[in-house]
Image: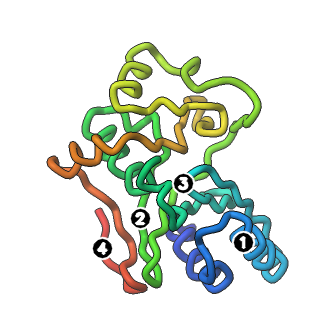
């Protein structure tokens, strides 16, 4: 069986013709995904926040940024890649859902594993972390840890939405952050 990232890449190729017309509006994306679901008899969910849209399947999530000014103000998916790289380098990657990048037909998509136990109506993620983990998150401007932004993987908290402030992008750009890319302009490229 192939891993979730490869299945997500196939999904992006399959759903792209349905969503390519307008990636700026969650409402339009929802309509287009509903059409995709009916065409292929699938159950893809659409969730959106202030800066990103997520397409949720049974084992992976595909995210992309709105094409808007909110992304710059609030941090987009690329910022999540930067923070994941910093967390990996500093030994805290276990707190986060791994994020990978693919570019398809000129659009950036980001892939994460699906986590379970997300409760959109109950609690904040801080209660599931040690004092050291909380301090690390706060030191890296990760403060929006409400119940819709985390789930659980193997009994441990797993943060799925980790936008943060722009100053960390500069920290990452000045260091050796890695970003996994799978496709660039529709052509496969190697990844680490």
Q: Residues within 10 Å of mark 3 (few under 14, many from 20)?
A: many
Task: Work out whether residue 64 or residue 72 is closer to the camera in this orientation and state it.
Answer: 72
**Mark 4 touching mark 3, by CB under 8 A?**
no
Q: Earlier in the sequence, mark 2 or mark 3?
A: 3
Give the quarter of the image for residue 24.
Answer: bottom right
Q: Measured along the vertical axis of the image, is residue 80 above or below residue 143?
A: below
Task: Using residue 65 as the reference point, say whether residue 35 is left or right of it.
Answer: right
At x 74% / y 60%, what residue is drawn? 45
Q: Secondary structure at mark 1?
A: helix
Residue under the image location 74 percent in, 72 percent down: 33
Q: CA distance from mark 1 to mark 2?
A: 23 Å
Disc assigned to residue 51: 3
Mark 1 or mark 2, whichever is nearer to me: 1
Quarter assignment of residue 22: bottom right
- The residues bearing labels 1 and 4 have C-alpha atoms spaced at a distance of 33 Å
> Residue sitting at 73 percent across and 35 percent down?
119
Q: Secondary structure at mark 3?
A: loop
């Amino acid at each position: 069986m192939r891993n979730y990232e490869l299945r997500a890449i196939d999904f992006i190729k399959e759903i792209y013709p349905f969503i390519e017309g307008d990636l700026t509006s969650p409402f339009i994306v929802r309509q287009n995904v509903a059409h995709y679901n009916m065409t292929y008899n699938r159950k893809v969910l659409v969730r959106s926040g202030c800066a990103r849209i997520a397409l949720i399947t049974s084992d992976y999530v595909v995210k992309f940024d709105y094409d808007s000014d909110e992304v710059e103000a609030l941090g987009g998916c690329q910022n999540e890649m930067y923070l994941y790289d910093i967390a990996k380098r500093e030994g805290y990657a276990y707190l986060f859902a791994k994020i990978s990048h693919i570019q398809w037909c000129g659009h950036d998509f980001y892939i994460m594993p699906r986590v379970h136990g997300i409760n959109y109506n109950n609690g904040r993620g801080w209660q599931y972390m040690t004092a050291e983990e909380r301090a690390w998150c706060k030191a890296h401007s990760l403060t929006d840890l409400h119940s819709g932004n985390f789930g659980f993987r193997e009994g441990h908290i797993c943060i799925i939405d980790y936008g943060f402030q722009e100053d960390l992008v500069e920290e990452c750009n000045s260091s050796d952050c890695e970003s996994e890319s799978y496709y660039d302009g529709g052509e496969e490229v190697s990844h680490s």
